[in-house]
Amino acid sequence: MAWILLVIGIFFSVGATLSLRASAGFSRFFFIIVTIAGYVIAIIFFGFSVRSLPLGLVYAIWSSTGIVLVAICSYFIFGDKFSPTSIFGIVLILIGVVIVRLAIVTA
């Protein structure tokens, strides 16, 4: 159940971050509200997930998955471009999460 809560929190966090961009510098009221509500809900789900999962693992997955999903979504929604270096960096982030996950499981 904690994993499901974490996934829900990640999706709210990603949605809030994308809404932050869509708010155009806090000039579009609807997206301001979506941003604030999304981050509040995301933090609540983050809190629920750390009740039964290790904090380091949850935060590593939370932040890295959020980075990757926001980057991918911003490519399709906002037309953001990636350089080969940025793609390499995203791959390194994902590899890092796998290493952290494996380290916590074997500890």
Image: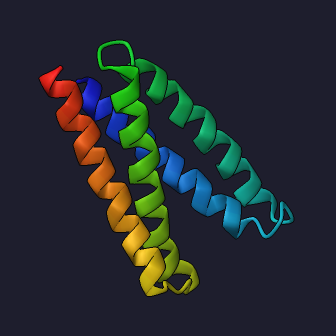
Location of residue 91 in the rendering, given as x and y in whole percent from the top left corner: 32, 66
Residue at x 27% of width, y 33% of height: 4
Quadrant, the N terminus = top left
Lateral position of residue 12 relative to residue 93, left or right = right
The C terminus, quarter of image: top left
Residue 39 found in image quarter: top right
Which one is in front, 72 or 107? 107
Q: Which residue lies furthest to the right in this view?
A: 27
Q: Quadrant of residue 68?
A: bottom left
Q: Pick whichever, 104 or 68, lies toward us.
A: 104
- Residue 24 sits above or below residue 99 on the image: below
Q: In this view, does 78 lie to the left or right of 58?
A: right
Residue in the image at 26% along x and 31% along y: 3
* Residue 57 place in picture, x, y as percent: 33, 30
Number of residue marks: 0
Q: In this view, does 19 lie above or below 13?
A: below
Q: How is the image coloured?
A: rainbow
Q: Residue at x 37, y 12 (%)?
A: 51
Q: Which residue lies furthest to the left in this view?
A: 106
Which residue is nearer to you in this view: 69 or 59?
59
Q: Which image quadrant is residue 69 in?
A: bottom left
* Residue 20: % across, % down: 69, 59
Image coords of residue 7 (percent x, y): 33, 41
